[in-house]
């Protein structure tokens, strides 16, 4: 099949964070001699997103971080906690350095870049044909790593979103505490259905990302996000006359017990949110996405298929489904639920649980920190829902992940 068809060993379809981490990991693990292509309509550069996550210091991300903290605050209306994360840290990583490192990896690996959107992946079990438009494929790959956003294979029994707007604030005098971050501040007005909180990620005493986040079924309008952020600034005691909004960040992340199919065909592997990297109960994604990249690179370096392990243990996905049901059905109070997790467990255990790296014994300790009656109720209801789906599969309405809200125009379904 000639006519300009490009033959490669591995094609990365989508060039965002997941693909960038894979490229960097391939260089870090010494992968040589592979023909690699990236297929994406955009060549990503600069700061288009910020990732916040926890890990242990002393790794390949150290030089890329904007800031990190060994202490964080978790605040509820009745309690103010300052938590020591050692041996972990909470870290903030902006996308610009990640894209720069990926660009250098592309150069070193001799990557072929196709600036177009992939419209079809035709997998015959031996090779994958990638079509970007028209009848003829432009690329033939031994493996495709697909990180394009997509909804779950079918809607879940609970379908929520983590949606947010953040302001990068520059102040004319010291206003922020650079020694620690605010991880969750639940003093924000709570929505009728869902959970809201603010957080503060300071780079230094005069510059910080201040964000308003909701876990709920629908995004807000742009004006509602701005109003919520202004209210949170007032709660923090920030003087708007002394602050300038330098940048605005918006985002929408799925929180659902609907299944994401990580391997839709023999030689297509999905990564990132599409590959199950988003934790359903919190929306955290980066740590699992990074694990996927490392596992893919290790496999390719060893000559094995680039298929990462499931992002989270099956028991964690079940626990997430129960927690989502409890929150959605108002069986638990969101701020109290998260507050009890941090009150009754060491902070590193909670963070490792949210990353899906705790042991069964630690999971049981986390479960014991929740109120038993609401969680038993949610567990029984979840089991009944699963049984019903097996005996008489439910035909739920189509569920799509809406785009982030930019400006003041409300998306469909917004409050």
Image (cartoon, grey):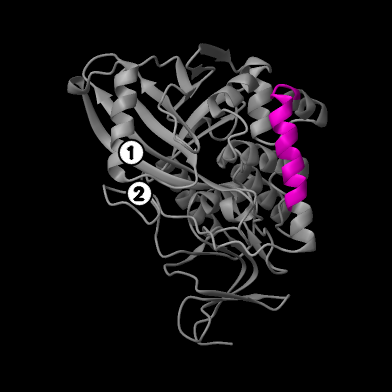
Classify residue 365 as left or right of residue 250.
Answer: right
Disc 1 marks which residue? 225
Quadrant of res 145: bottom right
Quadrant of res 53: top right
Tell me residue 251's x, y (percent): 42, 45
Q: SS class of the residue under badge 1?
A: helix
Tell me residue 319's x, y (percent): 72, 38
How many numbered discs, if any?
2
* Residue 183 sits above or below residue 42 on the image: above
Q: Earlier in the sequence, mark 1 or mark 2?
A: 1
> Which residue does the image show at 67% across and 75% down from the upper left?
127
> Which residue does the image show at 65% across and 35% down from the upper left?
355
Classify residue 187 as left or right of residue 23.
Answer: left
In the image shown, does 221 or 346 lie closer to the viewer? 221
> Which residue does the image show at 68% across and 66% down from the upper left?
264
In the image shown, does 196 or 117 lie closer to the viewer? 196
Q: Main secondary structure of the magenta part?
A: helix
Q: Residues within 10 Å of mark 1 (few under 14, many from 20)?
A: many
Tell me residue 176's x, y (percent): 35, 16
For the question of whether residue 57 can be seen, the reply is no
Disc 2 marks which residue? 405
> Which residue does the image show at 73% across and 43% down from the upper left?
381
């Amino acid at each position: 099949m000639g006519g300009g068809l490009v033959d490669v060993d591995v094609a990365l379809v989508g060039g965002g964070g997941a693909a960038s981490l894979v490229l960097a990991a391939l260089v870090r693990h010494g992968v040589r001699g592979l023909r690699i292509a990236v297929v994406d309509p955009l060549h990503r550069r600069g700061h288009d997103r910020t990732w916040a996550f926890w890990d242990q210091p002393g790794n390949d991300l150290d030089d890329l971080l904007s800031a990190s903290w060994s202490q964080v605050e978790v605040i509820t209306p009745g309690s103010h906690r300052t938590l020591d994360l050692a041996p972990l840290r909470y870290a903030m990583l902006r996308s610009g350095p990640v894209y720069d490192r990926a660009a250098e990896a592309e150069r070193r690996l001799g990557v072929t870049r196709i600036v177009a959107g992939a419209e079809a992946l035709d997998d015959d079990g031996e090779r994958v044909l990638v079509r970007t438009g028209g009848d003829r494929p432009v690329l033939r790959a031994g493996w495709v790593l697909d990180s394009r956003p997509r909804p779950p294979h079918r809607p879940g029994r609970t379908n929520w979103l983590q949606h947010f707007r953040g302001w990068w604030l520059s102040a004319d005098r010291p206003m922020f505490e650079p020694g620690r971050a605010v991880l969750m501040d639940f003093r924000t007005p709570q929505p009728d259905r869902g959970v809201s909180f603010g957080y503060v990620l300071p780079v230094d005493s005069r510059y910080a990302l201040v964000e308003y986040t909701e876990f709920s079924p629908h995004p807000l309008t742009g004006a509602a996000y701005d109003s919520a952020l202004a209210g949170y600034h007032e709660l923090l005691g920030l003087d708007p006359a002394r602050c300038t909004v330098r940048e605005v960040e918006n985002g929408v992340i799925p929180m659902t017990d609907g299944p994401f199919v990580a391997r839709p065909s023999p030689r297509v592997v999905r990564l990132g949110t599409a590959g199950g990297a988003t934790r359903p109960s919190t929306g955290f994604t980066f740590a699992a996405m990074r694990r996927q990249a490392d596992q893919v690179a290790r496999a390719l370096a060893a000559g094995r298929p680039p298929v990462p392990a499931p992002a989270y243990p099956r028991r964690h996905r079940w626990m997430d489904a129960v927690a989502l049901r409890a929150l959605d059905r108002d069986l638990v109070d969101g701020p109290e639920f998260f507050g009890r997790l941090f009150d009754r467990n060491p902070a590193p255990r909670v963070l490792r649980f949210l990353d899906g790296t705790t042991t069964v014994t630690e999971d049981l300790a986390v479960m014991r920190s929740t109120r038993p009656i609401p969680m038993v109720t949610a567990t029984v209801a979840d089991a009944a829902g699963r049984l019903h789906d097996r005996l008489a599969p439910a035909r739920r309405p189509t569920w799509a992940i809406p785009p982030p809200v930019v400006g003041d125009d409300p998306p469909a379904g917004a409050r």
